[in-house]
Amino acid sequence: MANPSTATAPEKASKTRVLVKGKLVKLRARQLPAGGESLYLDYNHNGKRKYDFLGIHLLETPKTSLERQQNKDNQLLAERMRSERELDLSKNTLIVKASVQRKANFLLYLDEFTEAYPKKDARVIKAMATKFKKFIGEPELLPFSDVTVRLCQRFRMHLDQTCSGSTPYNYFKKFRKVLKQAMKDGIIGQNPAEDVENRYVEGIEKAVLTTQEIQKMANVECYLPEVKRAFLFSCVTGLRFCDVNELEWKSISGNVMRVKQQKTSKDVVVNLNTTAMKLLGERPKPTVKVTGKKA
């Protein structure tokens, strides 16, 4: 059997058929003038179409079991050669692709990720992205190849030095999320931030209003009554303003409120006291939020 040879396109007058349609390489059969078929590979390489003739033939009308078995064995051999050629081409394609992807701009990817992020903690993603850009000096280009483990470690230390409470943990968690998505998108093969230590630190102790101070605030007139109501509701329930602002009536059943916090993504259950229930007022249509905005 002859070795595979690369040639020009088969004669247009000859009938051809596809035996195996692979991702990168097709196995075709070309009808011979004297009868039978010649098997060859059809693929693209460096933008040019190539044909590799394998020197393997199929009998046109096998008459005996031996001839039928010969046809079967020859086609299996050709299919194996097609698989090997496709594997070689695939490896070369991946090497070129990886080289191009490592040069891709991480900052552009970060912007696109931030703009398309659909969840309620989008503001945390945006704040993290702003923080990261300031950390690296806001260049126009940062190749993925420059987003190394060392850079991730430095960014995590920078967060500890410039932020307080649980913010460094939450920001770096989102940073990891972006790189994890880049892995899923096939841009990087490994997440450089995955093994960087990201310790959770309990929130710092904060000054809180006393009952008397809250009462004084309640007695003060406000030209934006909905803002005042939201503020007081936040005081008596402990919810952050961002959660109160997005609170919907479907989250409240009787005097029990169930909310997923935007900052931590944790579910909380709050038993509403008499003051909180009064601040809620009457339940309107389901499409209206507690703060009065349309859902």
Image (cartoon, helix red, strand yellow):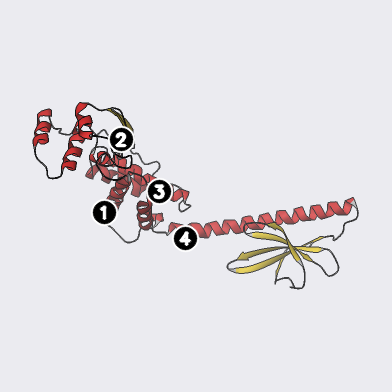
Three-letter amino acid code at the position of disc 2: Tyr
Which label number is shown at residue 179?
A: 3
Query: Considering only order in the chain, which callout, 4 or 3, is on the residue closer to the N terminus?
Result: 4
Quadrant for the C terminus, please. Answer: top left
For label 3, the crowd category at 10 Å Cα-Cα, with few meaning under 14, some 14 to 19 and many 20 or more, is: many
Q: Check disc 1 and report the residue beneath it.
A: 134
Report x, y in % for residue 291: 24, 41
**Where 211 falls versus 74 (above or below)?**
above
**Where 154 falls versus 100 (above or below)?**
above
**Where 204 falls versus 171 (above or below)?**
above
For label 4, the crowd category at 10 Å Cα-Cα, with few meaning under 14, some 14 to 19 and many 20 or more, is: few
Classify residue 44 as left or right of residue 137: right
The Cα atoms of the two marked residues, 2 and 4, are separated by: 36 Å
Report x, y in % for residue 119: 36, 45
Query: Considering only order in the chain, which callout, 4 or 1, is on the residue closer to the N terminus?
Result: 4
- Residue at 11% over, 42% down: 222
Query: Considering only order in the chain, which callout, 4 or 2, is on the residue closer to the N terminus?
Result: 4
Three-letter amino acid code at the position of disc 3: Leu
Three-letter amino acid code at the position of disc 1: Lys
Q: Check disc 2 and report the residue beneath it.
A: 200
For label 2, the crowd category at 10 Å Cα-Cα, with few meaning under 14, some 14 to 19 and many 20 or more, is: few
Does dot 4 land on a helix, a strand or a loop?
A: helix
Classify residue 167 as left or right of residue 48: left
Residue found at the very far right of the displayed protein: 64
